[in-house]
Amino acid sequence: MRINRLLVLKNRRYTIAFFGWMIFVTYMSLASFSDTDVADIDIPNLDKVVHFSFYFGAAFLAVLFFREVTNGAMPLRKAFLLALFGAIGYGIVIEVLQYALTANRHGDIFDALANSVGAIMGSLLIKSIFSTERWLKWRN
């Protein structure tokens, strides 16, 4: 029985990675870190790089998640578009939630833009990996 559970987890590695990543992004976006003893790093626009990275990873993993849950049956274009627009929409929702629900965080249009650029680049990279014959095949 234990071996069957391990096989299920192994067969759902992108699902686990995608949902784990999204939980991490959500927590990091909505949690307050003002009372922590973390040293202030003063690098201009570092937060935009973080936003870009969060949504680059989200879109990249989302395409792999769609491939995994459909066993490769979903067309690459559809998976690409769902991942792209899903990540952009999620980034906008998180910025609105930061504005509406948090005391120490604030929503920012430039953060939403960095989120969107990261989602575009992440989904373009995974699309390019699967779309040429030299790379991976989308269908099983």
Image (tube, rainbow, N blue to C red):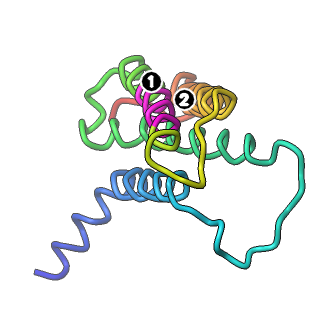
| Residue in front for this viewpoint, 31 or 100 | 100
Q: Quadrant of residue 68?
A: top left
Left or right of residue 67: residue 83? right
Could you tell me residue 62's position as x and y percent?
42, 39
Q: Main secondary structure of the magenta part?
A: helix
Q: Pointer 1: what residue?
A: 80
| Residue in front for this viewpoint, 94 or 19 | 94
| Residue in front for this viewpoint, 68 or 24 | 24
Q: Report the amino acid beneath label 1.
A: Phe
Could you tell me residue 3's position as x and y percent?
19, 79
Queried whether the magenta region covers residue 93, the answer comes back as yes
Q: How many marks?
A: 2
The residue positioned 41% from the left and 17% from the top of the image is 77
The quarter of the image holding the N terminus is bottom left
Q: Quadrant of residue 126?
A: top right
Provide the secondary structure element on which disc 2 rests. Answer: helix
Question: How dense is the environment of label 1, judged by Cα within 10 Å: few (below 14), some, or many (20 and up)?
Answer: many
**Magenta residues, start to end:** 86-96
Label 1 or label 2, whichever comes before in sequence order: 1
In the orientation shown, which residue stands out farthest toward the right? Answer: 43
Please say whether residue 134 is visible from this viewpoint.
no
Q: Are the residues tagged 1 and 2 within 8 Å (C-beta)?
A: yes
The residue positioned 42% from the left and 41% from the top of the image is 64
Could you tell me residue 49's position as x and y percent?
75, 43
Left or right of residue 24: residue 72? left
Could you tell me residue 137's position as x and y percent?
45, 31
Q: Which mark is residue 123?
A: 2
Provide the secondary structure element on which disc 1 rests. Answer: helix
